[in-house]
Amino acid sequence: MLLLLFILLTIFLYNQLNEDSRFEKFTQNFFHEELCSNPIHLHYTLADASAYNIDESTITLPIYTANQVLDEAAKIEQTISVLESFHPEKLSGDNQYTYVLLLSYLKASGNCASYLYFDEPLSPSSGVQSELPVLLAEYRLSTVKDIQNYLSILSQIPAYLEGIALYEQEKADYGLFMSDTAADKVIEQCSALMDMTELETGEHFLEVTFENRLAKLIEQQIINESEALAWQSENQRLLSTVVAPAYDKLADELTLLKGSGTNSQGLSHFPDGQEYYENYLHLTTGSYRKVSEMKSMLSEDFGNNYSALLTLLKQYPALQSTLNAENSALTTLSPEEMLTQLQRMIVTDYPAIPFAENETTAYDVKYVDDCLEEYTAPAFYLLAPIDDTSQNTIYINEQDTEEGLSLFTTLAHEGYPGHLYQTVYSRQYLQNSNANPVRNILHYGGYVEGWAMYVELNSYDFAMQMLDETQEETRMLYLAEKLNRQIQLCLYSLLDIVIHYEGASYERVRDILSTVGCTNEQTVHGIYDYIVEEPGNYLKYYLGYLEIKALKNQAETAWGASYTLCDFHRFLLNNGPADFRTLSRLIR
């Protein structure tokens, strides 16, 4: 009998270990393929690619070929098929969780990919044409090899953009090309971003930032001045004779395609657009609710905050004239002092970063170069590589970021306890708990931006805590600013659904905005055009925030007396990034 039990146990352990081994090999290959699909993303993701047996110099920009969208959709389906061949019940607990996350992620990606040509790589607000130069300007140069790889990427840009132009031609053939308004914006950006006058005078931001990075290598004695001059000359040559003409050619291709766009409104005005939008929201927000339920959540939140703001303004009428005005209570603090203050204030309700040698994580606060201010967000955090969490940089765009409360809440969003804290926590936790590395590359926009939105709104409360008892009016101003911020983002999220799912016209959106006092025609046009061009973007932030609030309520009910806010945050951080359906199923 004992011998039989031993044999059965041996078979069980062998099957489990064998299934784990097969699964880990599969995810390792997936991880490797995803990282090697784009040399720029690889460089931002790994500080030392060689440690993962990857030679960066062999990785090239992805070049789109005719009808490749069909191959990509088929590849996702094939990957799902292979993944479903595993027996999750035979996997270890950690691998089971990775399996659930990966399967959910791939199915959401596959559902979107099945709607051919809806993806738009040249969005006027966040497309390749504007994102690529910014990524190049921030490309990490630590070694001579990095310089060589960077210049190699510049030489590949013509073929890369030609592939995108081919894709846009296929979109046009499919009846899904962008509107003329959007095309004009992209064409203008192509000219502005690669201005030949700036290139010829050496004042272009890709010349200035490259020179600045080389200067640091000179200081570190990695290269000498004559080598730096040679690299700068080659950079200037490639930008002027290779990259700029490639941008001009892309602009010409888009000019020829103008007039083929059949829709200047929301996605629902395309055939199958409504269905695509619903699937796209599942992928980009990580929420699997029906769109009608999403709208109900948003509507309830909007009503509650709007009523609260009206009540507050009735109680403190003077706030009406100071709302959105620059305040001075926090203007004496530098960005570094604000981040230090935030780190001190989160210790009670946010868990310490696991396995960290120091209580604080190293970071740099930098200001966006003047030449880049027009093309970057008010602030942004550069993701730390998964193998080096000491590389953390927060950039502030002085052109778009006011001092005081606005800067404080922005730094909470980008730094502590926002993107920087969440990223370093996640990287450290996954690495030191031997979690499957593939979890580092599954992107859950709703989780990541929802978390940043959640802590940004909490930071208004931190700002109020910093005031003394005599500053009651300022405290109420901060509360009003918080409510106003929520109302605005919630309204834009609702408009996203109204435009893309319900097919609202510009006139209907104008009428909706007029009910909350927004009547400036230029402002209304700007809001409408942005939402048309960036479907789901506001929802990624604000619906993500509401989903985290829903998880918090669920945890309070399920955990009862044992619930603490710190434990809830630890739960989110340990199990994320993830979609909200998966996280909800973990709460017991």
Image: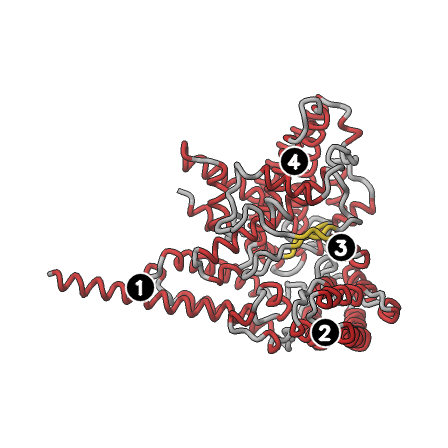
Above or below, 482 against 182 in this view is above
- Mark 1 or mark 2, earlier in chain: 1
**Residue at the spot of label 3:** 368
Q: Residue 342 placed where, x, y %?
A: 62, 40
Amino acid carrying label 1: it is Gln
Question: Is label 3 in contact with label 2 (beta carbons under 8 Å)?
Answer: no
Amino acid carrying label 4: it is Tyr
In terms of image quadrants, where is residue 119? bottom right
Q: CA distance from mark 1 to mark 2?
A: 47 Å
**Residue at the spot of label 2:** 154
- Mark 2 or mark 4, earlier in chain: 2
Q: Residue 435 placed where, x, y %?
A: 44, 58
Amino acid carrying label 3: it is Val
Q: CA distance from mark 4 to mark 3?
A: 25 Å
In terms of image quadrants, where is residue 42? bottom right
Residue 16: which numbered mark, if any? 1
Determine the residue positioned at 64% across, 77% down. 66
Quarter occupied by the C terminus: top left
Quarter occupied by the N terminus: bottom left
Pair 3/2: label in front: 3
Determine the residue positioned at 55% across, 55% down. 444
Q: Which structural element holds mark 4?
A: helix
Q: Which structural element holds mark 3?
A: loop
Q: CA distance from mark 1 to mark 4?
A: 49 Å
